[in-house]
Image: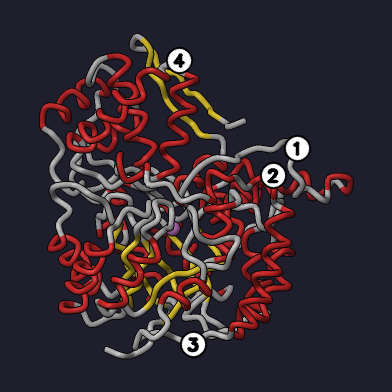
Amino acid sequence: MSKPVIFNNTVLRDGHQSLAATRMTTAQMLPALEALDSLGFGCIETWGGATIDAGLRFLKEFPFDRLDAIRAKTKTKHMMLLRGQNIVQYAHFPDDIVESFITTSAKHGMDIFRIFDALNDPRNMGTAIKAAKAAGKEAQGVICYTTSPVHTTEAFVKLGQELEEMGCGSLCLKDMAGLVPPRQAYDIIKGLKDTVKIPIVLHTHETAGLGASTYYAGIEAGVDYVDTSIIPFANGTGQPDTARMLALLERHPRCPKYDLDALQFLREHFTKVYAELSDFTSFANERVDSDALKYQVPGGMLSNFRNQLKEQKMEDKFEDVFKEIPVVRKALGWIPLVTPTSQIVGVQAMLNVKFGRWKNFSPQATDIALGYYGRTPAPVDPEVQKIAAQKSGKDPITVRPADLKEPGMDKLRSELKAKDFPTNDEHCVVHAMFPQELEVYYKSKDQPAAAPAPKPQAPAPAKTGPAETVELSDSARQYNISVQGKSFAVSVEEV
Ligand code: CO
């Protein structure tokens, strides 16, 4: 058990997604690559999550260009976060689009696909796992951590076993909200190590102040990898800082060796970048705050929610809405709170408090209740499912949701052709997920005056907490609010 633990580095993805609204540009990454590459990290997380959306939308970068630029200067393995059948969006895509995305990303040098599903439904990860393996790359199966009566240590271990059987080359216990207490992490990691043969990664956030201790406990339990970042894109709502983790592990038999001079160089470089991104950083994200533990929700959900309740003139209902969250989660089969389910549960809790319990359903909550997002960890409350079916006129399903999707690549190609855009697979998969953004990208690219776009207009999202919630607030957030039986689509942007 004295094999040193290996650090993965997240500064190029989760680090700036958690602490700077995903605004780091490729140009800001390039000077760090030689040092990052020299350190011997297990992998560097370079892509996925919100980086593809934010890069295209705010930085005017074509997603695959970043991957190429980083690949050209690094030999370390690249890792990306992929939302299973959602790829990097919020809804299910047909299998052929998921497969093309993975094949194409593999061709551009992606090595490890970290694949999760918001419901922990392995069927929503199967296509991605197979495609990654078929491309000769590593499929890393994710266990999303959450708390509920059905999320026992045994249930997490069983999911890990299932993912190994599906062909995953490694597993990741993903604690997107930084909620897993050290002893619980120890138990799950120990259970997995006793049961599965593939390597295990532990991923958490320092949001509530548990992150580094949780890693320590995971390392004691035999975890193979932990994710760390580089300060100042570390700690707070991000991953623990690499040098800090080294200090914490001093004299531990599993303490790894990483070049402190190279880490110091990176710290200095990223401190400059952090200052350049000051419009997107905030004290609220940097500090450690155990408030998230009280409500057992991602920290970002708390800050987003305070804003939304204000807009709805429901500030005085904060405690009521938060008490409603477990009620909604229980009715919807104890779904984890991660993108996009954290937002869906939050909106439904708000609707329940505002209009009375289950008087109004958001379309997304309806779809969860009826199985259109996949199999929930526990059965959906049959009464609630019945009301959702009646109100929506839709039938519940039990099949894998993507089985109902027609192949989509041909259609995407002809749409691109009609627009006179390139029709290769790279453009097809980007067009599938971000059609408007791709169009805006091409329009602004043709206008020489609009070239240096990265500087934002207004000090925007100085807000949210952990990574997975920042994702949604980066984009204009869409909510469907139903008032007296009429449905309204509402976009919310933070000021
Ligand atoms: Co994360």
The residue that disc 2 covers is 279
Q: Specify the quarter for ligand 1.
A: bottom left
Residue type at mark 3 is Lys
User: SS for tag 3?
Assistant: loop
Mark 2–mark 1 distance (CA, rounded to whole Å): 9 Å
Question: Of the residues shown, which amino acid type is indicated by label 2?
Answer: Asp
Q: Quadrant of residue 114?
A: bottom left
Q: Which one is earlier in the sequence, the residue at label 2 or at label 1?
A: 2
Give coordinates of residue 204: x percent, y percent.
Answer: 39, 61
Q: Secondary structure at mark 1?
A: loop
Which residue reaches farthest top? 484
Mark nearer the N terminus (2 vs 4):
2
Q: Is residue 495 above or below residue 379?
A: above
- Of residue 421 and residue 401, the one placed in the foreground of this image is 401
Amino acid type at circle 4 is: Lys
Mark with earlier residue (1, 4):
4
Q: Earlier in the sequence, mark 3 or mark 4?
A: 3
Disc 4 packing (10 Å; few <14; some 14–19; many ≥20) = few
Q: Is residue 85 visible?
A: no
The Cα–Cα distance between marks 1 and 4, rounded to whole angstroms, is 28 Å
